[in-house]
Image: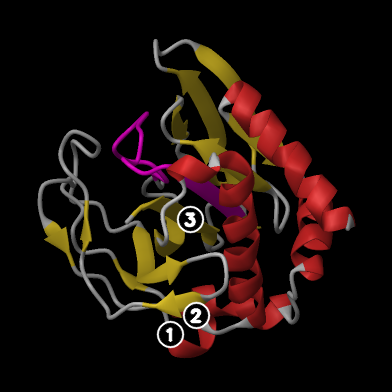
Amino acid sequence: MQSDSSLSRIAETTREHGFAFLPGAAMRELLSAYGMTDWESFAASWDDLGPDLYMADGGRYRRRRYATFALDHEKTERKRHQPHYQSRDYNTLNGGIERWFEPVADNVGDHPAMQAILRLMQHFTRDMSPPSLQPETWHTEIHQFRIEASENGSGHPTPEGLHQDGVDWVLVLMIRRENIASGDTTIYDLHRQPLGVFTLEQPMDAAFVDDHKVFHGVTPVYPVDPERPAWRDVLVVTLRHQ
C-alpha cells in the first residue's frame, strides 16, 4: 500500500534526525488514504475557537480548543473532557497548573479529517516504537490553535520558547495562514545546536517530531498588511504512553 511506504519513509527520517517535514500535497495524499474527506469544513472550524485565558505573559493573541483521545491499534476513543497540564520543566511560562480550555466540538473530533489524522498517527507510532515499548493505549491530545497578529503586536506560536512537550511524539499540521509573515519552525538537538529550519506555509504542511530527541519552537508571526486580519491556524497532536 502506497500510504504504508510513504509513512515508513517519514518514520525513517524522524528516527534518523528527530523530525521530518512533509509538504502539504504529500500529506493530503497520505491523509486521503486514511479516509480524509471534506477538508474545507474541517479547516473552517478554526473560526470558532475560544480565547486562551492562561497566558502568563498577558497576551491575548492565542485562541484554542482541546480534546483527548485514547488510541490503540484498532480504534480511537474520545476521553471525557479534562484539563491540559504541563509541568514547569516543560513549559516555564504557562506550566504548573491545570488549564481548562473549551473542548473540541463533537463534529470536529468525529470529522473524517480528524479521524484520518488520528489513524495516521496510530500507524506512525507503530512504525516508530518497538513492539516491546508500545503501550496498549496511547494518551493523545489534540490542540486547535489560532495565533493572531496585528499592527499593535506580534503573535507567538510558542511563547514558552524553544521547548519539548513532555510526550513521545508530536505532529504539527498547518491548517491555514492568513496575511502572516514569519512563523518559522526551528529544530534543535538536545545540546541546543540547530538541526533545521522550515516554514509550514501551505495547508497540510506537516512536521513530525520525536520529543525525546529534539527541541522545537516557532518564531513570532507578523501581519503582512497591518490593516487586515492576520492569523496562523495549526493542529497539534501529541502522543505519550498512557
* Most foreground residue, 221 or 127: 127
Determine which residue is flagged by label 2. Answer: 109
Stretch of the chain drawn in magenta:
156-173
Residue occupying image coordinates x 42% and y 60%: 136
Rounded to the nearest angstrom, the CA distance separating label 1 from label 3 is 16 Å
Image quadrant assignment for residue 60: bottom left
* Image x and y of residue 201, in percent: 69, 47
Q: In this image, 54 relative to 4: left or right?
A: left
Identify the mark at residue 105; answer none if there is no mark: 1
When the figure is inspected, residue 205 is found, relative to residue 162, above or below; the finding is: below
Task: Give the color scheme: rainbow, by chain, secondary structure or one colour.
Answer: secondary structure
Residue occupying the point 49% across, 46% down:
170
Residue type pointed to by label 1: Ala
Residue pushed farthest bottom? 107
Q: Amino acid at mark 3?
A: Val
- Which amino acid does the dot numbered 2 rest on? Gly
Name the residue at 10% across, 54% down: 97
Name the residue beneath numbered marker 3. Answer: 236
**Quarter of the image where the N terminus is located:** bottom right
Label the magenta part by its dominant secondary structure.
Answer: loop
Q: Are marks 2 and 1 in contact (CB under 8 Å)?
A: yes
Please state if 66 lies on the left or on the right of 85 as rendered: right
Q: Is residue 224 visible?
A: no
